[in-house]
């Protein structure tokens, strides 16, 4: 990884494990109007502090174009295509990476790191390795030559946790709920959270 890499730290298991694994130059969390933003910010700030990584954040309101569980499902712009998963927000990862790159450029970063894992691609196309290859080409083509790297798209979350060496203490800050600042226990994010802990042997 570059010495000037910027990790998009959502506060979930994947980005937390990636932070512990690659130790980026800094981390960034974006408030784009998602319902669980307060939980994500709380988790990301705590993880960055625990790992000794600089943490940055900013807000851009994308709710006028949002949909799915992360949005609340009450948008006037609900997509006319069938959503591939309940939390699907059209072009969300493309928008967030573009925003991160736009912020990174004047702050001297040259890489955007994203914590997508292999199962993400089963739920929506913007979680696949092919998507990030294309997005990397597009962003690097533009002024600044910033690269977009998703190092774990060939791994499961459990694989990433195991290779990262992340401690239980750091992983314990993770927030995965799609609808609230505290775990609802029933949404896909919360279900994945519990499954990951169980399969990694960390569920107490």
Image (tube, grey):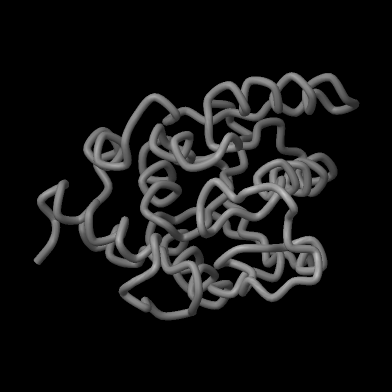
| Rendered residue at 34%/29% (across/down) | 155
Q: Is residue 156 above or below residue 51?
A: above
Where, by quadrant of the figure, is residue 3 drawn? top right
Using the image as rendered, state which of residue 194 and residue 11 is in the foreground: 194
Where, by quadrant of the figure, is residue 60 drawn? bottom right
Task: Classify residue 97 as left or right of residue 27.
Answer: right
Q: Position of residue 52 (x, y in %)?
A: 44, 56
Task: Classify residue 24 as left or right of residue 189.
Answer: right
Task: Classify residue 49 as left or right of residue 67.
Answer: left
Which quadrant does the C terminus fall into? Answer: bottom left
Q: Position of residue 62 (x, y in %)?
A: 78, 63
Using the image as rendered, state which of residue 166 and residue 33 is in the foreground: 33
Using the image as rendered, state which of residue 129 and residue 163 is in the foreground: 129
| Rendered residue at 39%/61% (across/down) | 188
Most extreme residue toward the right is: 143
Q: Is residue 24 above or below residue 77?
A: above
| Rendered residue at 53%/53% (across/down) | 9
Using the image as rendered, state which of residue 82 and residue 167 is in the foreground: 82
Q: Position of residue 140 (x, y in %)?
A: 78, 22
Q: Position of residue 136 (x, y in %)?
A: 69, 24
Task: Classify residue 164 as left or right of residue 149.
Answer: left
Q: Is residue 126 above or below residue 143?
A: below
| Rendered residue at 60%/37% (across/down) | 126
Where, by quadrant of the figure, is residue 114 drawn? top right
| Label tally | 0
């Amino acid at each position: 990884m570059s010495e000037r890499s910027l990790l998009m730290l959502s506060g979930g298991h994947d980005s937390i494990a990636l932070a512990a694994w690659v130790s980026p130059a800094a981390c960034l969390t974006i408030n784009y109007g998602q319902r669980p933003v307060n939980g994500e910010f709380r988790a990301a700030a705590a993880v960055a502090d625990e790992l000794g990584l600089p943490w940055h954040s900013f807000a851009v309101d994308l709710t006028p174009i949002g949909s799915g569980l992360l949005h609340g499902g009450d948008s006037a712009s609900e997509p006319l295509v069938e959503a591939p998963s309940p939390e699907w927000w059209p072009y969300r990862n493309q928008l967030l990476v573009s925003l991160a790159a736009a912020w990174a450029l004047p702050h001297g970063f040259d890489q955007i790191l994203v914590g997508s894992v292999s199962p993400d691609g089963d739920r929506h196309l913007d979680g696949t390795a092919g998507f990030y290859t294309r997005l990397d080409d597009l962003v690097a083509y533009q002024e600044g030559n910033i690269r977009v790297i998703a190092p774990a798209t060939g791994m499961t979350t459990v694989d990433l946790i195991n290779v990262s060496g992340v401690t239980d203490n750091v992983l314990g800050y993770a927030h995965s709920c799609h609808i609230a600042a505290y775990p609802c226990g029933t949404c896909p994010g919360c279900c994945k959270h519990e499954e990951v802990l169980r399969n990694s042997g960390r569920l107490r």
